[in-house]
Image (cartoon, rainbow, N blue to C red):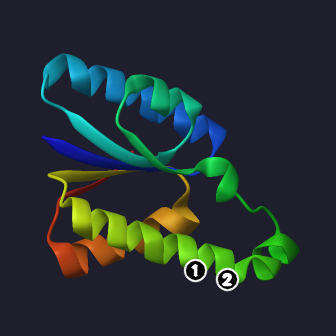
Amino acid sequence: MKYFLIAGEASGDLHASNLMKSIKQLDKEADFRFFGGDLMAVQGGTLVKHYREMAFMGIVPVVMNAKTILNNLQLCQKEIAGYQPDAVILVDYPGFNLKMARFVKARLNIPVFYY
């Protein structure tokens, strides 16, 4: 199966990497694309965007980086639509991931799991 995962911070990278490791034990054909970090990259697959390029905390940094955040959302939508995974797994990072969940459910009809 094909899996698209999104983890937008270090703790999500850790949890997602452990999940990927478990998925690989159950699904020998698992193929991953993801927004995440170094720990997820160790598990294999294609790192599309590192969480360091996505994590903005506080009102001022979010406002100052609004265009970057919007571009990241659009890139993620395009990546998921093009990859056509069997499942999308969202790890924490609710400000970004809940928007992606709405997009995937409304437009792509792909199962979404919030972890």
What residue sits 67% from the left and 56% below the top?
A: 53
Which quadrant of the figure contains the N terminus? top left
* Disc 1 residue crowd, few under 14, some 14–19, many 20+, Cα 10 Å: few
Give how far across and how far down residue 106 sits, in percent. 23, 81
Left or right: residue 25 compared with residue 4: left
What residue sits 29% from the left and 21% below the top?
A: 22
Left or right: residue 83 compared with residue 35: left
Mark 1 sits on what residue? Answer: 70
Give how far across and how far down residue 7 sits, in percent. 51, 47
What residue sits 20% from the left and 51% below the top?
A: 87
In the image, 79 versus 12, the foreground residue is 79
Looking at numbered disc 2 in the image, what kind of residue is underneath it? Lys
- Against 2, residue 29 (above or below) is above
Tell which residue pokes out farthest to the right in this image: 60
Looking at numbered disc 1 in the image, what kind of residue is underneath it? Leu
Q: Would you say the residues marked 1 and 2 are in contact, meaning their CB atoms lie under 8 Å apart?
A: yes
Mark 2 sits on what residue? Answer: 67
> Which disc number belongs to residue 111?
none
- Against 98, residue 43 (above or below) is above
Which quadrant of the figure contains the C terminus? top left
Give how far across and how far down residue 14 sits, in percent. 54, 29
The residue tagged with tag 1: helix, strand or loop? helix
Give how far across and how far down residue 100 sits, in percent. 40, 69
* Disc 2 residue crowd, few under 14, some 14–19, many 20+, Cα 10 Å: few
